[in-house]
Image: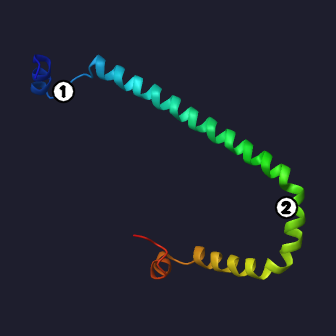
Amino acid sequence: MTPDDQLSAFLGEQPAARRADVMIAAVMQRIERRAFVRRVAAAGGWAGVVGLISWACAPVLKDLVGALAPGLAPAAAALALVAVTLLASGPEVRRRLGLILS
């Protein structure tokens, strides 16, 4: 312990942050901020790519969905009913069904 630390401990004060610790924290914050901005930019780019692909495929998908929708409507309604029931039920019901891991 340095004499300053001993004096701070004796007086019951918290020792002041050292300049090196403050600098390390500032550098780490800058690095994390850059990494975050890079991840957000990459996610935005991928979202744009997926949007363009979806826009390009929209005419084909419109015809496909129009042809398949009447046959799949009852199954979609049943799945929606199950989803609403599970969302409205309490955690005990989901736990008994094995849908909660903890």
Task: Tell me the SS state at disc 1.
Answer: loop
Q: Would residue 62 appear left or right of 82 to someone viewing this image? A: right
Q: Determine which quarter of the picture holds residue 13.
A: top left
Residue 90: image x %, image y %? 51, 77
Instruction: Name the one closer to the observer, 102 or 93.
Output: 102
Q: Would residue 89 appear left or right of 67 to someone viewing this image? A: left
Give the amino acid at mark 1.
Glu
Quadrant location of the N terminus in the rendered image:
top left
Question: Which residue is located at x 35 percent, y 19 percent?
Answer: 23
Question: Which residue is located at x 55 percent, y 78 percent?
Answer: 89
Tell me if residue 54 comes above or below residue 38 in the rendering.
below
Give the amino acid at mark 2.
Leu
The number of numbered badges drawn on the structure is 2
* Label 1 or label 2, whichever comes before in sequence order: 1
Question: Which residue is located at x 27 percent, y 23 percent?
Answer: 17
Tell me if residue 93 comes above or below residue 19 in the rendering.
below
Residue 20: image x %, image y %? 29, 18
